[in-house]
Amino acid sequence: MKILTVDVGSTYTKLTAIDSDRRSVLGTAQAFTTIETDVMQGFETALALLKQNLENDNISDFNYDKLLVCSSAAGGLKMVALGLVPDLTAKAARTAASNAGAKVVNTYAYEISNAEQQEIYDINPDLVLLCGGTDGGNKEVIIANAHRLCAIDRQFTTVVAGNKSAADEIAEIFSQAGKNFVITENVMPVFNRLNIEPARDAIRNVFISRIIEAKGLNKIQAMAAAEIIPTPLAVLNACELLSKGTKSQQGKGDLLAVDIGGATTDVYSMASGLPTVDNTMTKGLPEPWSKRTVEGDLGMRYSLKHVYDQLPSHNPDDEKMREVKEWVELCSAKPDTLALPDSEEEKIEEFLGQSAVSIAVERHCGKFADVYTPLGLMHTQEGKDLMEVPTVIGIGGVLRNSRHPKEILKGALYSFTSPESTKPKNPHFYLDQRYIFASMGLLSYLDPELAFELLDKETVGLGKAGE
Amino acid sequence: MDKKTIVIGVIGADAHAVGNKIIDLTLTNEGFNVVNLGVMVSQEEFIEAAVETNADAILVSSLYGHGEIDCMGLRQKCDEAGLVGLPLFVGGNLVVGKQEFDDVKQRFLNMGFDFVYPPSTPIENTIVDIKKTLGI
């Protein structure tokens, strides 16, 4: 059987051709996304390119039996999340939305204000995740926020995943206001216990039932063998599969993956993240084994300026830094700029890529702190301890195009300049050379054994940092 | 009737875990919904847990003698977080050295605690006060 996967990205529509009989990736191709007019144009162009590539490899008449599609086009799945306490249900809400593959534009805590209400109106999200209160806990805030969401004149759907004791009243409020809503299980039913899967599934279902058409994807959906899912969810599936393995193939165990795009950088970790240092007590919300964070301000083109702004303190008049600044300005103005091999720009590009990886992974990882107690030195840890994670995988254009992807990925390493951050200390680096993670995440619904086999085969080892 | 929710924990940099477990067990057996934050709990964590779970009382333990510094300002922060009038209980080895308990108690009452217990108070005594306060 021949399978074609399509990733409709915000810039490129990427195709991957898979032959399940030969158990191999036949080829890949990409063309500009044409979502504003007709998504099929970009798809047809990419398909023609793919056929040409395949013919060059002596595979003629490629016809697919099954088409699988994921999408992050037209802004992806734009969401805002609401919770009660910033470190508790608001954080749980953000985690659930991120793991569902959404781009979480903002998170709000407590009862939102008029200004925040206006902000949500301006963001114009596709979906809102409303949380707050443990089951039987605080009801007032989530109910007040339900009223406030109803007052926002936008077409979003609200997924309610908060205090179950408030669910009926909230259903009433949304029904009376004529707003779309779905009620699901609480993201934090009991204090400090995460339950994000029901919210994640509800978000996925709303994406399928209501968003696909609004995003102009219905034509391609009509041809597809399965429902379209958000691209980050497909990548998350691939990471989970590679880490856990299948019935007959052993997984790779704990891993961290970084996907650097033009506008955002996504970090995925598949690990329990329990402390690896003695006398450490964990604080704060427990972490899900499979976790995604997305950094909307870190990317290699549209958000390169923000990467530059967050570089460690430097002298802006330094000649090297001036060159970096010029490159950043050029890339921001012309996103299709590419660095030439062996040029000064190539080094700058790698430096900026490494910085983006460093900041994104630092935000994803946990924080470690020393506490001096009457019982001696103890440590506390918030978030995941990923110091002993053995595998770091790089995904994304800047890594694939670079001749030194390992240098960029070194940004993920533990550093003595921020010793409190629990980044991996001595991992093996890998590269997704043909950008197949999203594709394999889609394939995993159909044939997990094959998807795992191909992921394993196509992920190239780059060795450890010092090698 | 709905169970009453009580947030418990050992405040500050104090890592004494055993008494905390006993309190958790006893309160649970008495029919309370216990939110146990464990040891080394900050004031903020007590308050966040109480807000999120709509708690009926907070029970603070301190065993290592730094309780006074650790507990200062808890009442004010509760007020700030909208937990006005939430009953606050505190007990353990609250201070170091040989100090008159009546003085210690008065200082903690002044800080806004409703009930202050001397060292070695059985949790059962506290439960009597909790039930009375919550009208059980």
Image: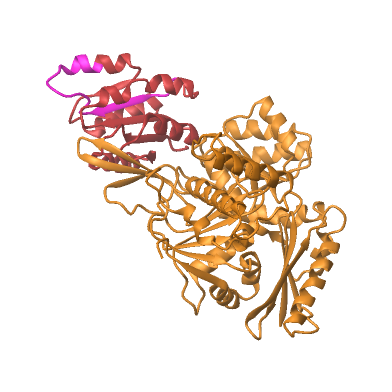
Chain colours: A orange, B red
> In the drawing, does residue A5 fall left or right of residue A287?
right
Does residue A135 sit above or below A346 in this rendering?
above
- The residue furthest left is B98
Which residue is drawn at the image coordinates 30% and 32% (left, top)?
B12
Q: Nearer the viewer, residue B67 or A341?
A: A341
Q: Is residue A131 visible?
A: no
Which residue is outermost to the right? Answer: A37
**Residue A196 placement (x, y as % from top left):** 55, 51
Residue beneath the point at 65% across and 58% down: A340
Q: Which residues are magenta?
A: B85-105
Residue situated in front as seen by the camera: A233 or B85: A233
Q: Nearer the viewer, residue A81 or A335?
A: A335
Q: Is residue A239 left or right of residue B100?
A: right
Q: Is residue B92 left or right of residue A126?
A: left
Is A130 part of what is drawn in magenta? no
Q: How many marks?
A: 0
Q: What quarter of the picture does the C terminus of chain A occupy?
A: bottom left
Location of residue A207 by image quarter: bottom right
Q: Position of residue A213 (x, y in %)?
A: 81, 55
The image quarter in which residue A24 lies = bottom right
Residue A76, given in percent of the width and then of the height, sits at 71, 51
Name the quadrant of the N terminus of chain A: bottom right
Quick check: A245 above or below A151?
below
Residue A305 in percent (x, y) is at 63, 41
The residue shown at (72%, 29%) is: A118
